[in-house]
């Protein structure tokens, strides 16, 4: 199991389930974008958890921005449709398209 699987496992210890973001970092051109896309697709096709994939480095995430309002609305919509114990997985490729 990878770290994300462990965080989503209902039998995992509390400190693993409550873990914060998992950050994938590395040198340029080391396939981070491909890895994130593949992971997002894999979790999406499993249909166990809602998945949101964000591919942008230019989002304005300050309070009150339309981007953060849209993301909040999407997450609220997903949460309303999901089970209470279901976790939403967000993959955010913040370096994609930075050039």
Image (cartoon, helix red, strand yellow):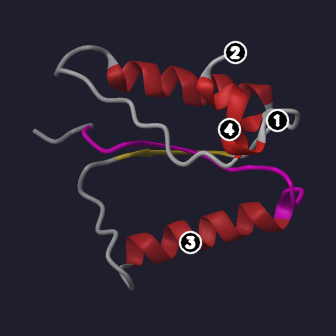
For marks 2 and 4, give the CA distance. Answer: 13 Å
Indicate the position of residue 89 as horizontal and vertical percent values.
63, 44
Q: Secondary structure at mark 3?
A: helix
Residue 48 at x, y percent in the picture: 82, 35
Q: CA distance from mark 4 to mark 1?
A: 18 Å
- The residue shown at (72%, 46%) is 50
- Could you classify mark 1 by the number of other residues whose Cα lies within 10 Å: few (under 14), some (14-19), or many (20 or more)? few
In the image, residue 39 sits, relative to residue 93, either above or below, namely above
Residue stretch in magenta: 81-95
Q: Which comes sooner in the sequence, label 2 or label 4?
A: 2
| Badge 3 or badge 2: first in the primary sequence | 2
Q: CA distance from mark 2 to mark 1?
A: 15 Å
Q: Nearer the viewer, residue 87 or 95?
A: 87
Label whose residue precedes the other's in the sequence (4 or 3): 4
The mark nearer the N terminus, 4 or 1, is 4
Q: Quadrant of residue 35?
A: top left
What mark, if any, has residue 48 been given in the picture? Answer: 1
Q: Which residue is mark 2?
A: 1
SS at badge 1: loop
The residue indicated by pointer 3 is 72
Discs 3, 1 touching: Cβ within 8 Å: no
Q: Residue at x 10, y 38 (%)?
A: 99
For the residue labelled by badge 4, is the local secondary structure a helix, a strand or a loop? helix
Pick whichever of labels 3 and 1 is earlier in the sequence: 1
Question: For mark 4, what is the residue?
Answer: 16
Count of numbered circles on the image:
4
């Amino acid at each position: 199991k990878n770290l994300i699987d462990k965080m989503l496992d209902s039998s995992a210890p509390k400190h693993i389930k409550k873990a914060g973001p998992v950050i994938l970092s590395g040198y340029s051109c080391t396939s981070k974008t491909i890895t994130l896309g593949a992971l997002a697709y894999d979790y999406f096709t499993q249909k166990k958890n809602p998945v949101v994939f964000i591919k942008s480095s230019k989002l304005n995430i300050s309070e009150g921005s339309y981007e953060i309002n849209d993301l909040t609305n999407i997450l609220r919509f997903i949460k309303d449709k999901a089970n209470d114990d279901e976790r939403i997985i967000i993959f955010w490729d913040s370096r994609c398209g930075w050039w």
